[in-house]
């Protein structure tokens, strides 16, 4: 039990500090140091999971999948909070009217939000899983509205309503999975381990219905194609640290939830339905997002659509039942996307605009920023030698091996369009003519954490070897819940 | 236990939801939600007595105080704060929505065998639960005001609660309480936002909030 309390302890103390009045001066630094200290602690706690051990208490469990996503969430949250400590005080000094109370609220909500994001991959109880996902929605909605503008208010309302309704469907799906156990002799259960153990005795029709509703619900939260409507608004209108957490950590949470439910389906011998639904959905999401990427005129909206595209790839990974690629690609995407959102926040701060046609010449104004931004742009577009390239390539290879040729070809087309669109947009921002001189030069120190993240992405690209993939496969399959 | 009583209450809450489709006054809508939820709490009590489970009665009490009393009172207060009385709806007249609501009710009734659990005694309630979920969605689509969207969401949530009560061997009470708690937080947060939307847009008409489009 102490393990699980330890994981949530630092974010929750940060949340508590936010409630105390008159802490605004040191609160950002306190938040950043807490989340930085969280990195070694979480790695230490999760290390046993990578050698196949599991730690469980009540409804919670650390297995390979849970450990991987806990570490991703920690990295993302730490980067976001470090950046918040740089950006938010600078904004307050620079004329944004943000009261001490609102800053405190930002840290309180962020702390609970991060703790809830830990609870999602670590719960082995489908009811608590749902509660954790809904808590992330409720805690992040006010965070989006940090600047209190009209646009952010509209984005927040859309996010709150669409995701709440989506999540309500997931609750219905969860209840249907419970109802599917009506023939169990010793009562129904919500523990995933017990469900998978008796999965064959479940009513297949109700289980299928339950899966479809869960997919609809958690899929809304993940932003799969026809349900992605709220995502670009929410991700672009929120302050940069929040955008980073929404894109880098929250989307993963929703995908993990889908993965957990799909594992129940697989145990019940219904893997075919999972594949028939998720493979086309993933491919269509990639293609649709790539088309929408072309005409973007707003830097952060472009990044948001790129997130939709990667959600499509991750959905495809779940569809072909490849947990190892889900972990690997989620890691690679999160690292790079967080770096990009942090840099987008810096650019907005320096130039005062996110309009792509008005941006240009970052390389000339600040070579450091130009280089890191160019690297991140290439990485998110999936070019070698970054980690994203490797995981996308492995994903396509697995899709071909598993006979999903049509989907794989569609994804290749989508990735090509994405590559062109992103390099075009980011290239113009980095190398293009300076159209709108910067109000203030981008702060060099702010580029440090994105640069570090890019180094991690490079290392992740170099580290992938057959041995690593085998370990990940064992971890994904050994997910004994 | 009197089984027909449970089905009767379930049908009552579904009919109330359909009635809400034809109503424009926010106060009446809130009464609708409150009564609906009270009936579900009644079902919960009936189950608790029949199965001799004290925790179900506790759950019923929690549902009643939070969802049937607390939330409608809170929403009525925020409606008063932003000074609204009626929700005229989007293009479709309330009468027409009421008709659609009736069709939805019939649809729920006819879909009941698909969703009902064979071994359960209250199979009819499954259809009523579906009708509640679909009417909630209908309300969310056809209404203009942010507050009505919250009311539609509550109706949906009620449908899910009814389904979990009648078609499963009951969710663990702790999980049900968690769900009620989440709904409460969601309503509180949306109440704050309704107030803010009203302050910066000078209305809470969500159909007029469409600047973020491309």
Image (tube, grey):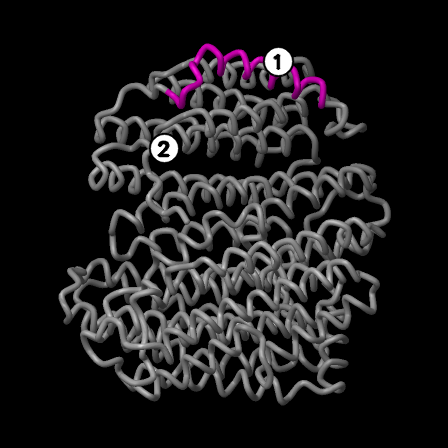
Residue drawn at x 47%, y 25% is B139
Q: Give the range drawn in magenta.
A: B89-111
Residue drawn at x 37%, y 80% is A431
Q: In this view, does A174 lie above or below B123?
A: below
Q: In this view, does A128 lie above or below A52?
A: above
Crowd around label 2: few <14 · some 14–19 · many ≥20 (10 Å): few
Is A314 situated left or right of A450 in this image?
A: right
Q: Does the magenta stretch include residue B90?
A: yes
Q: Is residue A16 visible?
A: no
Q: Which image quarter holds the N terminus of chain A?
A: bottom right
Q: Nearer the viewer, mark 1 or mark 2?
A: 2
Chain designation of label 2: B
* Label 2: which secondary element: helix
Q: Does the magenta stretch include residue B64?
A: no
Q: Where is residue A103 in the image (x, y as percent from the top left)?
A: 24, 63
Chain designation of label 1: B
Q: Where is residue A273 in the image (x, y as percent from the top left)?
A: 79, 49
Residue drawn at x 31%, y 31% is B205
Task: Report the front residue among A231 and A56.
Answer: A231
Is A87 situated left or right of A93 in this image?
A: right
Residue drawn at x 22%, y 81% is A441
Q: Is residue A76 visible?
A: yes
Residue position marked by numbered label 2 in the rendering: B207
* Label 1: which secondary element: helix
**Identity of the residue furthest to the front in this view:** A433
């Amino acid at each position: 039990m102490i393990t699980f309390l330890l994981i949530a302890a630092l974010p929750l103390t940060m949340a508590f500090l936010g409630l105390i009045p008159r802490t605004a001066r040191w609160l950002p630094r306190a938040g950043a140091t807490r989340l930085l200290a969280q990195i070694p602690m979480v790695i230490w706690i999760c290390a046993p999971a990578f050698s196949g051990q599991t730690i469980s208490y009540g409804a919670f469990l650390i297995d390979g999948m849970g450990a991987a996503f806990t570490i991703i969430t920690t990295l993302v949250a730490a980067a976001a909070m470090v950046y918040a400590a740089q950006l938010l005080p600078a904004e307050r000094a620079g004329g944004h009217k943000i009261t001490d109370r609102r800053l405190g609220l930002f840290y309180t909500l962020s702390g609970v939000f991060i703790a809830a994001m830990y609870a999602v991959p670590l719960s082995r109880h489908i009811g608590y899983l749902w509660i954790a996902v809904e808590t992330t929605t409720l805690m992040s909605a006010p965070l989006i509205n940090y600047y209190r503008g009209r646009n952010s208010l509209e984005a927040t309302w859309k996010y709150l309503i669409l995701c709440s309704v989506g999540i309500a469907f997931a609750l219905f799906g969860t209840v249907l999975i419970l109802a599917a156990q009506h023939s169990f002799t010793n009562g129904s259960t919500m523990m995933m381990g017990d469900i998978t153990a008796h999965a064959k005795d479940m009513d297949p029709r109700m289980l299928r219905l339950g899966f479809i509703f869960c997919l609809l619900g958690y899929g809304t939260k993940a932003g799969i194609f026809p349900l992605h409507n709220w995502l670009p608004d929410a991700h672009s209108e929120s302050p940069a640290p929040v955008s980073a957490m929404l894109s880098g950590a929250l989307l993963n949470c929703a995908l993990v939830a889908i993965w957990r439910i799909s594992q129940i389906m697989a145990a019940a011998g219904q893997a075919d339905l999972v594949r028939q639904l998720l493979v086309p959905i993933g491919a269509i999401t990639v293609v649709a997002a790539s088309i929408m990427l072309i005409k973007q005129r707003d830097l952060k909206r472009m990044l948001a659509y790129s997130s939709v595209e990667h959600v499509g790839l991750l959905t495809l990974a779940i569809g072909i039942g490849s947990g190892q690629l889900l972990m690997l690609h989620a890691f690679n995407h999160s690292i790079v996307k967080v770096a990009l959102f942090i840099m987008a926040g810096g650019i907005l701060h320096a130039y005062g605009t996110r309009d792509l046609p008005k941006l240009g010449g970052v390389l000339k104004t600040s070579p450091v920023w130009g280089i890191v931004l160019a690297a991140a742009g290439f990485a998110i577009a999936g070019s070698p030698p970054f980690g994203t390239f490797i995981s996308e390539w492995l994903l396509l290879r697995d899709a071909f091996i598993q006979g999903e040729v049509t989907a794989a070809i569609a994804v290749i087309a989508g990735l090509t369009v994405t590559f062109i669109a992103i390099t075009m947009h980011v290239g113009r921002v980095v190398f293009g003519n300076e159209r709108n001189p910067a109000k203030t030069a981008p702060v060099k120190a702010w580029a440090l954490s994105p640069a570090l993240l890019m180094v991690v992405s490079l290392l992740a690209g170099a580290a992938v070897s057959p041995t690593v993939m085998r370990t990940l496969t064992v971890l994904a399959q050994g997910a004994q819940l | 236990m009197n089984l027909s009583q449970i089905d009767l209450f379930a049908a009552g809450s579904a009919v109330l939801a359909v009635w809400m489709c034809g109503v424009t006054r926010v106060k009446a809508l809130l009464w609708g939600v409150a009564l609906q939820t009270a009936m579900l709490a009644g079902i919960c009590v009936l189950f608790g007595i029949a199965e001799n489970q004290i925790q179900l009665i506790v759950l019923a009490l929690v549902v009643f105080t939070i969802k049937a009393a607390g939330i409608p009172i809170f929403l009525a207060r925020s409606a008063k704060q932003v000074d609204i009385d009626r929700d005229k709806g989007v293009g479709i007249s309330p009468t027409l929505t009421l008709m659609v609501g009736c069709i939805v009710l019939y649809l729920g009734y006819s879909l009941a065998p698909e969703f009902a659990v064979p071994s359960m005694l209250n199979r009819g309630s499954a259809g009523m639960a579906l009708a509640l979920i679909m009417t909630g969605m209908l309300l969310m689509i056809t209404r203009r005001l942010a507050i009505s969207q919250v009311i539609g969401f509550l109706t949906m949530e009620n449908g899910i609660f009814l389904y979990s009560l009648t078609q499963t061997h009951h969710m663990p009470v702790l999980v049900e309480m968690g769900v009620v708690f989440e709904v409460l937080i969601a309503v509180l947060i949306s109440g704050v936002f309704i107030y803010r939307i009203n302050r910066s847009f000078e209305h809470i008409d969500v159909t007029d909030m469409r600047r973020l489009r491309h």
